[in-house]
Image: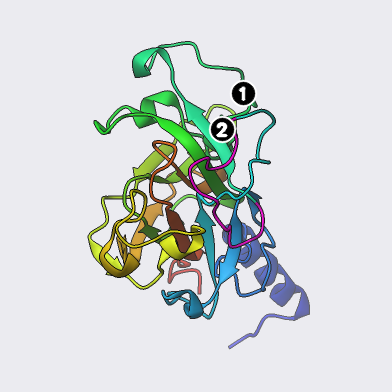
Amino acid sequence: MKHPGPLGLIASVFALAWLAPATASIVNGSFESGTLLGWESLGDVSLQTSSIGISPTDGSSQALITTLCGDGTSIPGPIGCQITNVERPYSGTNALYTEFYCQDFDPDCIRPPIGTPGWEVFDFVGLTPADLLTDPDPPGANGEGSAIRQSFVANAGETVSVDYNYVGEYEWGFLTLLAIDPGSTLRIIERAPRQTLLSNMRLCERVEGELVGSDICDYPNQETVETGYRHFAFQIPDAGTYQIGFAVFEIEEGTVPSAMLIDNVTLTPVPAPPAIW
C-alpha cells in the first residue's frame, strides 16, 4: 500500500479545512470569565452566583438584568427612576426609564425616532410596538428596564441555545434572536411566560423600606415568584451574522421589580459528515 508523501498530507489537511464550516462561537456564554466580556449591556446588569438564591445552570456564574432603579438619574427631567420607592440595583447602575405609549398601541402608529429616551431598551434588543400588543394587562410599558445582547457569526445548521429564568410578578421579559445581515429576515421574539414557582431570590428586599403587605411587594414573607430556568434552542437556517438579546422592563411605574437570569448561551456546530473522516 502506498502512503501519501508530505505534499499529499498537506493537501489532505487543506481539503479538510476547505470542507469544514467556518468556526463560530458565543463569547463568554456562561459568564465564567467573571466579566461581561463579549456582551453589550444597558441598565442594571451584573454577574451573580448561587448566593443570590438561584443556581446557575452551567458553571458558577450567571448574568442578571433587572428593573431596579435608585435615584432618578437614568434620564434627565422629573421622570426617571422609581418614584414610589427607592431601589438598590445589584450592579450599582440604574435601570433605564422605558416608555411605550403609541396611539393606543396601534402597531401602525408613528413611533419616536430610534434613540429617543425611553426607547433605548426596545431598540437595543430589536423589539417593536407590535411585540407588546398581545398582553391585555395592559399592552404597554412605563417604568425602568435593562437589557443585554451579543452578536455572533453562525453557519447553517448550527444550534444556538440558552437557559433563562424570569423572576418577578407583573412585568415584561423577552428573548430576541435576530438576523442582522442586510436582506435577512429571521426574527424570533419569545416572551417569558407568567411565573408560577416560589423563588428564593427575594427581589423585594432590594426595595428600601418595603414591608410585608405593602402595595408594592405583597407576597407572604416577601417571597418572589419565578418561571424557573427554561431552555431555548433554535437551529440556524442560513450562514450569517445574528444577535441574541434579553430584556426586562416594567409595564407600569410603581409595580413589583422584576429580573431575568441568563446562563449557558451556546452555539453548537454541525457535526462533520462521517465520509470526510
Image coordinates of residue 212 in percent, x first then y, are 33, 62
| Relative depth, front residue between 189 and 113 | 113
- Alpha-carbon neighbours of circle 1 within 10 Å: few (<14), some, or many (≥20)? few
Amino acid on which the number 2 mark rests in the picture? Asp
Amino acid on which the number 1 mark rests in the picture? Ile
| Relative depth, front residue between 148 and 257 | 257
Identify whether 120 is placed above or below 89: above
Within the magenta stretch, is there residue 80? yes
The residue sitting at 65% across, 70% down in the picture is: 12
Q: Is residue 180 left or right of residue 217?
A: right
- Alpha-carbon neighbours of circle 2 within 10 Å: few (<14), some, or many (≥20)? few
Mark identifier at residue 136: none
Q: Which residues are magenta?
A: 79-93
N-terminal-most mark, 1 or 2: 1
| Relative depth, front residue between 74 and 261 | 74
| Relative depth, front residue between 226 and 36 | 226
Image coordinates of residue 271 in percent, x first then y, are 45, 67
Residue to which mark 2 is pinned: 123
Q: Secondary structure at mark 2?
A: helix
Image coordinates of residue 184 in percent, x first then y, are 51, 31
Residue 193 shows in the view: yes
Residue 190 location, quadrant: top left
The residue sitting at 39% across, 40% down in the picture is: 189
Q: Secondary structure at mark 1?
A: loop
Q: Which image quadrant: the N terminus?
A: bottom right
Residue to which mark 1 is pinned: 114
**For the residues bearing labels 1 and 2, Cβ distance under 8 angstroms:** yes
Q: Main secondary structure of the magenta part?
A: loop
